[in-house]
Structures are given as C-alpha cells and as structure tokens.
Image (cartoon, rainbow, N blue to C red):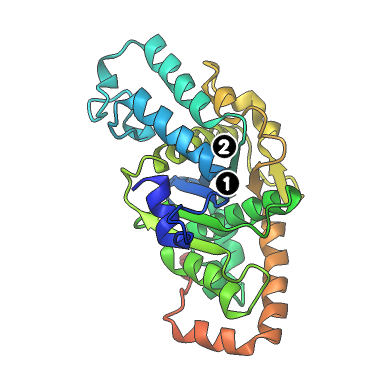
Amino acid sequence: MSVRELAGICFGRSLEGVFLALAIRVHFDGSGKEESHPVITVGGFLANEKVCEDIERDWEFATGKKVFHLTDFGTPKCKLDSGTWPIPKRREFLKQLASIVNRTGCHILSASVEVAPYNAFLANSPHAHVNGPVFSGCAQAAIAIAEHILKKESGHKQKVGYVFEKGDRQHEIAKMVNEWDDTNSDLSGLRCLSFLPKDTTLLQPADLVAGIIQRCVIAAHQALPCLDNGYSRTALYNYERRYSVDGVTTAVVSGHDHDRCWVINSKTFTVLDRLSSDFFERYPEVLETRLKQSPFKPRQPKKQNR
C-alpha cells in the first residue's frame, strides 16, 4: 500500500480529488521478543507525506521492490540474495538504506524497554489493562516520543497517521488512539492508526531502524547489569560505545540519538500510572469500557520453591 493510498483511507480526499498533502506519517516496527530478549525496541521514522513518498521511491529503487528484513539480511532467506554478498557489500548496502531514511525532513525515533523491570512494574500496576505487555508499553512510549516531536515543531494539530506491522499488539495501542476521540481531546479526529502487512514498503525502513537500534541496546545490556540510570529515560547516544564498528548504527541514528531515540526507564511508567489514575478519575466511563474489553492481565511471577 502506497503513501497516498494510506492517506486516502485515513483522511479522505479534498473536493478536487487531491490527497491531503499536510498529513504526517509515522511508521513503526518492533524488534526483539519478550520470551528471549532482555530488551524490546520499537523504532521508526516520522516525516510528512512528500518526504515519505521520496523514501518509498528511493527504497524501492535500492531494493528492486524486493522485501527487506534485517533479521534475514546476509542469510540464505534474504530475498535480496545478500547471503552471497561479501561483507563489505552488505555493509555499504545497509549504509545506503540508512541514508534513504535518515534524510532531511525525516525524524528517526525509537523507544527501548528492558523486559524484566517492566514486567516487575506491571505486576504491581493498577492499570495493566492500559499498559499491556512490554511491546505495547514500548509502542505507546514511541508514540509519546512522536507526539513530543510534533509539539516541538508545531505539528501537533496536523493530521498524523501511525502505522504498525499487522499482528503487532493492536489492542492497547488502538485503545490509546481511540481515547483521543472518545474524550474529545485536542487530538480528536487528527490521528489515524493502521496495521499493515510486513511487505509494506515504508515498514521496511522502520524495520531497519528498530533492528539496528535493538542490536545496540542488546550489546549495551550485555555489558551492563541494567540500562536504568535512575532517570526517566536515557538517550541512545549514551551507549555510543556499543554502536557497530562498521558505521551502520551511526548511519541510521546520527543526528537523532540525542533527543529522539531513548531507553525508557521504570520511572517513566510509574509516572504514567499516576497519569492514568488521574485520567480515569476524570473519565470513569472510559475505565468502565476498558475493563469490559477483555483487559490484558499480566502473568503472575512464578513462585520459587524453597
């Protein structure tokens, strides 16, 4: 599905039949699995429709319209046949893809969350149905980063379309976006949420961003007992020593790793819990609706045998 097709579905056409040109697109993808990784990352990019069209065109030219997936890159499963490429060619190709998305007018952004501390927080949270499992909490943090960027750049009142891969934790993310309409907030009618197939062109650069940043935070986690430094969040550049020596990490995040790519620490979710309590005091009908929607319940930690 192209940028213009998605914009039409979300926001319709003008009377002249032209797609709304001011729509902003935010494409996200997740990297890591709760069952096997100590950290989860949701990353991607934010750009206006024109820049997204340029990324889409250049990406399809570079890949020959074959589906790119970082996990498969350099293996026999890669549809680009990169498994047969020498390492220098793989490195330069990844840098080429990085330059397509890390361009003027495009914001690279990400949220990474440590799994064990998040689950410990969730076990005692009165609002587990809001936060959801670690991927959902991570995705909602990523959306919050995007909204902060929009406010900072006076784009808060523009129409914005958020796109995730189909099959990602849709429930909590969708409820979060729907509440902007249900409570008549200043974002009412200005946000669209879509879940599209993995082969959607603009989800592929989001996959690159999320995967490369995930590799960095996993390397940092292996070197440190934990990533939480006591602050609410930690900028990615603090782990610059863990960027890949081949320059690919730098190519992806350069210019964005000080204020748009973050490791989200436990203090953030504690604050969000308090905000949720205040929110539901003001909108008890929303809480009642949420609790009727088969709410997520965190798994209880296993009791250790003594």
Position of residue 251 measured from the top left corner of the image (x, y, whole percent): 56, 23
Out of 53 and 260, give the one closest to the viewer.
Answer: 53
Q: Residue at x 48, y 68 (%)?
A: 174
Image position, residue 240 (x, y; %)? 66, 27
The residue that mark 2 highlights is: 217
Q: Position of residue 58 (x, y in %)?
A: 42, 27
Any part of residue 111 in sight: yes
Instruction: Give the answer, above or below, for where 130 lies relative to 13.
Output: below
Task: Tell me the amino acid under the disc marked 1.
Answer: Ser
Q: Which mark is residue 147?
A: none
Circle 2: is it few (<14), some (14-19), or many (20+) Cα within 10 Å? many
Total numbered circles: 2
**Mark 1 and mark 2: Cα distance apart in space:** 8 Å
Determine whether 163 is above or below 59 in the image.
Answer: below
Position in image of residue 102 (x %, y %) = 56, 30
Residue 294 in the figure: left or right of residue 230: left
Foreground residue among 224 and 109: 109
Read off the residue under disc 1.
Answer: 112
The image shows residue 233, relative to residue 266, as above or below, that is above
The residue carrying pointer 1 sits among few (fewer than 14), some (14 to 19) or many (20 or more) residues within 10 Å by Cα, namely many
Query: As shown in the figure, which amino acid type bears the numbered disc 2?
Result: Val
Name the secondary structure under disc 1.
Answer: strand
Q: Is residue 306 visible?
A: no
Instruction: Report the residue at 51% width, 58% height from top.
Output: 134
Residue placed most toward the observer, 137 or 144: 144
Q: Residue at x 41, y 18 (%)?
A: 93
Q: Earlier in the sequence, mark 1 or mark 2?
A: 1
* Left or right of 271 on screen, residue 132: left
**Marks 1 and 2 close (CB-CB < 8 Å):** yes
Q: Is residue 155 left or right of residue 177?
A: right
The image quadrant of residue 66 is top left
